[in-house]
């Protein structure tokens, strides 16, 4: 599974969003409603599924859904 598919899957699980409802330019915290603590958990889970470890300082830079996809692609 590539990073984009994984993010779609996880946002579906965490936020009960359908793929067509995911806006990749949306701010995860302000527009999508992801709690900052949940964002860290989500990134950790995504990284684990991709077999990578993502430093906390990189997670703090994630703002949009696309930022999350890019982060996973860069570490994957």
Image (tube, rainbow, N blue to C red):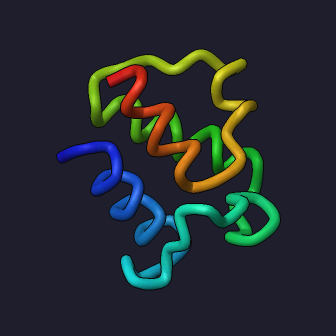
Q: Where is residue 44 in the image (x, y as percent from the top left)?
A: 50, 33
Q: Position of residue 53 (x, y in %)?
A: 44, 17
Q: Which residue lies furthest to the front in this view?
A: 25
Q: In terms of depth relative to the viewer, which is nearer, 73 or 34?
A: 73
The image quadrant that residue 57 belongs to is: top right
Q: Which residue lies furthest to the left in this view?
A: 1
Q: Where is residue 51 in the image (x, y as percent from the top left)?
A: 28, 23
The image quadrant that residue 56 belongs to is: top right
Q: Position of residue 17 (x, y in %)?
A: 47, 79
Is 73 positioned to the left or the right of 2 in the image? right
The quarter in which the C terminus is drawn is top left
Q: In this view, does 36 lie above or below 57?
A: below
Is 51 positioned to the left or the right of 27 in the image? left
Q: Tell me which residue sits at (53%, 43%) in the image.
A: 68
Q: In this view, does 17 lie above or below 38?
A: below
Q: Tell me which residue sits at (65%, 53%) in the image.
A: 64
Q: Tell me which residue sits at (36%, 20%) in the image.
A: 52
Is 2 positioned to the left or the right of 26 in the image? left
Q: Tell me which residue sits at (64%, 47%) in the image.
A: 39
Q: In terms of depth relative to the viewer, which is nearer, 41 or 21?
A: 21
Q: Is residue 60 above or below residue 4?
A: above
Q: How many labels does the image show?
A: 0
Is 62 positioned to the left or the right of 73 in the image? right
The image quadrant that residue 32 belongs to is: bottom right
């Amino acid at each position: 599974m590539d990073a984009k598919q994984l993010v779609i899957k996880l946002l579906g699980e965490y936020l009960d969003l359908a793929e067509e409802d995911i806006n990749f330019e949306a701010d995860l915290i302000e527009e999508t409603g992801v709690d900052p603590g949940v964002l860290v958990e989500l990134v950790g889970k995504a990284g684990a599924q991709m077999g990578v470890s993502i430093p906390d300082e990189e997670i703090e830079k994630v703002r949009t859904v696309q930022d999350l996809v890019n982060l996973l692609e860069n570490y994957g």
